[in-house]
Amino acid sequence: MKRSVALPPSTVESAMTTDLLPKTRLLISRSACPRELCDFAESLSTEGYTPASIHTHVIYLSQALARVPRPHDLGPRAPGDIDRAFKPRGGPPTRRKLFEGTRRTYTRFLRARGRVIKHGLKTDSRNFAVSTSSTLSRCAGSQPRRDRITQTLSQTFWFVASGHGA
């Protein structure tokens, strides 16, 4: 039975009206991360997902969020954290397929909001700075101030990687 329900303001900061099953609304209200589940459900509803499909995705997302570092944090998430959170803990092949479907849908949701950390950017910046500093030291034949070179190269890498240098 499809009904339009409003989530109470106590569950999320602002009341939201969307087509959800009563059991989905209950799941969201009892969750440790109601805001994330509510936003995700609203996004799926906007995309035209059926209430039953939304419910399935909310179930698997709530299970996965329990496995991510800082589940209440609405900031960016690392791809590796997302992948690990959605790794099913056994069960039939259908369960694995449902987890995978929710992982793809949640990743798309996060990307649309700019909340996926670019893979390895911080580590790549450090490696780039260290290896370039080493190369410059060899070429110069002396030992330049490594901390200054590392800082400058790190800033340059972040500038280029963030799209400002394009």
Image: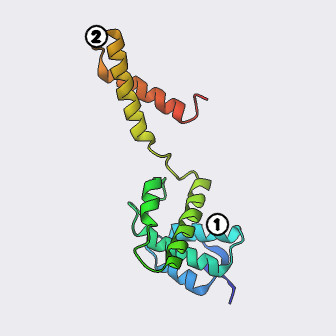
Q: Residue at x 42, y 62 (%)?
A: 84
- Considering every residue shown, the one lying at the far right of the view is 48
Question: Which amino acid type corresponds to the residue marked 2 in the rendered image?
Answer: Ser
Q: Depth check: give the residue in front, 92 or 140.
A: 92
**Rendered view: 51 above or below 81:** below
Q: Depth check: give the residue in front, 140 or 49.
A: 140
Instruction: Check disc 1 and report the residue beneath it.
Output: 43
Residue 14 in sight in this render: no
Q: Which comes before the other along the chain, label 2 or label 1?
A: 1
For residue 64, side relative to residue 94 (left or right): left
Quadrant of residue 123 in the image?
A: top left
Question: Which amino acid type corresponds to the residue marked 1 in the rendered image?
Answer: Ser
Image location of residue 20, percent across then percent down: 64, 80
Q: Is mark 1 on a helix, strand or loop?
A: helix
- Considering every residue shown, the one lying at the far top of the view is 141
**Rendered view: 133 above or below 46:** above
Instruction: Check disc 2 and report the residue beneath it.
Output: 142
Q: Residue at x 70, y 67 (%)?
A: 47
Residue 119 in sight in this render: yes
> Which circle, 2 or 1, is nearer the viewer?
2
Quadrant of residue 73 in the image?
A: bottom left
Q: How is the protein colored in the picture?
A: rainbow
